[in-house]
Amino acid sequence: MTATITASSVGVRRLAGNIGSEITGVDTGEVLGDETVAAIRQALLDHKVVFLRDQHLDYGRQVAFAQRLGPLTLGHPTLDSPAGQPLLEEIDSHKGGRANHWHTDVTFVDRPPAFTLLHAVVIPPVGGDTLWANTVTAYASLPPELRDLADRLRIVHTNDHDYAAVYGRGERVDAALARAQEQFVSTVYEAEHPAVRVHPETSERALVLGGFARTVLGYSPQASRDLIRLLQEYVTRPEHTVRWHWREGDLAIWDNRATQHYAIFDYGDAHRRGERVTVSGPAPVGIDGRPSVLLKGDASAYYAGAAG
């Protein structure tokens, strides 16, 4: 019988001043006690992203652990999952899988994931780090006048914008990236979110922005771009970030309700592959109590992933 890992074995070491910690003493591929899972969840809420080295995970083990944090979504609303693994999104550089833009996962639907879990399977010999930013401390750092404005803004996010654009290498368009982009926008989604959400577990206020944000309601396209850029600059200030240098077997877990992230594409043609699962989240709610609204597309199947 496999021994249950207990909370007393869990270590938490902060990595940066405002975000990030490394958890030790846990193998998420083994049987974990409720207190251990609660300790991991609390570290997530406290530090926004946590990292665990040398995790022994296959699809079944990763899903089993992720389900301890809540019901899961499908792998992605538009991208195909590997055969027999409907709850997994494969992030594979050889198949056009890059995320070298600041974003919060899947904000183009009205109920973005609460948590994301990414397991490193193949890591390039040089490069391929990921940055995370704390959108709670970013909000707190806004000047009072800008914070008051942000509190009242509503922003439309879509998958058919910015992050989904095809980026070629010089004059040559990357064919794999082009195919991935075509599938990414095969169904167009639009969702209206508050620019500032109230975190459902901590009651902290966090900015809801990133590469899927397109239009600020009530503002012209140019003014929308300027407002989004202005607010986004506070998110990505170095003081609000942490950088992780991956090793194969690492597991990163982040609170998608309080972070953005950026996968650095500095490894050329080398192979980089991760396996991602996401925990369902509620619709963001603004400080005025108004929830997010889905404007285009039907994401019901995505939300019901774990039930399928």
Image: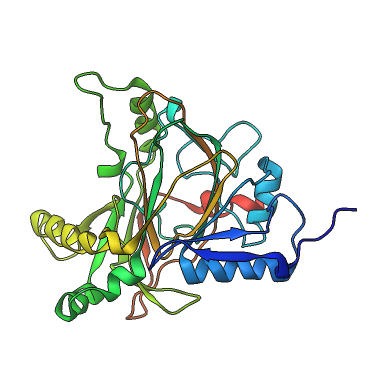
Is residue 265 shown above or below 295?
above
Query: What residue is rendered at 33% in x and 71% in y?
Result: 137
Q: Residue furthest right?
A: 1
Residue 99, visible in the rendered structure: yes
Is residue 235 shown above or below 81?
below
Count the labels in the image. Answer: 0
| Viewer-nearest residue: 2 or 219 | 2
Query: What residue is rendered at 58% in x and 32% in y?
Result: 82
| Viewer-nearest residue: 264 or 275 | 264
User: Where does residue 126 sit, x and y in percent of width and height?
Assistant: 41, 32
User: Where does residue 25 sit, x and y in percent of width and height?
Assistant: 68, 59
Residue 193 occupies quadrant: bottom left
Is residue 150 shown above or below 67?
below
Is residue 53 shown above or below 273?
below
Q: How is the image coloured?
A: rainbow
| Viewer-nearest residue: 65 or 43 | 43
Left or right of 251? Residue 225 is left
| Viewer-nearest residue: 100 or 15 | 15
Left or right of 96? Residue 220 is left
Q: Residue furthest top?
A: 172
User: Where does residue 191 sit, x and y in percent of width and height?
Assistant: 34, 57
Left or right of 244? Residue 214 is left
Residue 161, visible in the rendered structure: no
User: Where does residue 277 sit, x and y in percent of width and height?
Assistant: 56, 48
